[in-house]
Amino acid sequence: MARPKKLPDELKIDTLAFRLTPAERLQIEDAARAAGVTASEYARMQTLRGRVVVQPRQSLDHAAFDQLRRIGVNLNQLARIANQTQRVPAGLTRACTAVENFLARELETRAPENASGGGGGPAPPASTRGPPDLGHGP
């Protein structure tokens, strides 16, 4: 007697491939054998029901990204002047320092809590800080 046909939503027709080291493959195959299932079924069950450790992502907010874009435009202008005149413009050092300071503040703001062990609270959001001084003002 033939096996009953599966419903269309039960058919496994899609594939998902990923790369493994030989040691990782052996580990999965051993675990699958111990569980009494195929390596494919074991990987499927672990993927769909297993525990996944989510890595925290650090991303810049819109205001911080906009500030970095503006700084980049200024640095590009200074680099163009340096290439045309074969001299380093006076504002280049200030611009580089401003970039370093801005990035340090942003990284400090995004550091995990209690990582520094110090008090004082987090730095204010980027939207409340003014743009870095690049030496172009009066």
Image: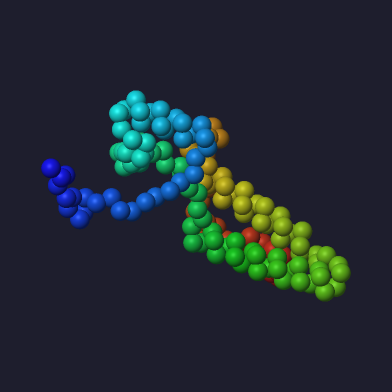
Q: Is residue 67 left or right of residue 4?
A: right
Check the image and name the residue furthest to the front.
Answer: 1
Looking at the figure, which quarter contains the C terminus?
bottom right
The image quadrant that residue 102 belongs to is bottom right
x then y, percent, for residue 82: 81, 69
The image quadrant that residue 132 belongs to is bottom right
Above or below residue 118? Residue 59 is below
Above or below residue 51? Residue 76 is below
Question: Which residue occupies 49% across, 61% down?
Answer: 62
Which one is in front, 122 or 85? 85
Which one is in front, 88 or 34? 34
Q: Is residue 23 left or right of residue 31?
A: right
Question: Which residue occupies 51% across, 46% down?
Answer: 110
x then y, percent, for residue 1: 13, 42
Q: Is residue 112 visible?
A: yes
x then y, percent, for residue 125: 49, 53
Q: Is residue 42 left or right of residue 85?
A: left
Q: How is the image coloured?
A: rainbow
x then y, percent, for residue 61: 48, 57
Check the image and name the residue furthest to the top.
Answer: 34
Above or below residue 88? Residue 29 is above
Above or below residue 35? Residue 103 is below
Question: Which residue occupies 77% across, 58% down?
Answer: 93
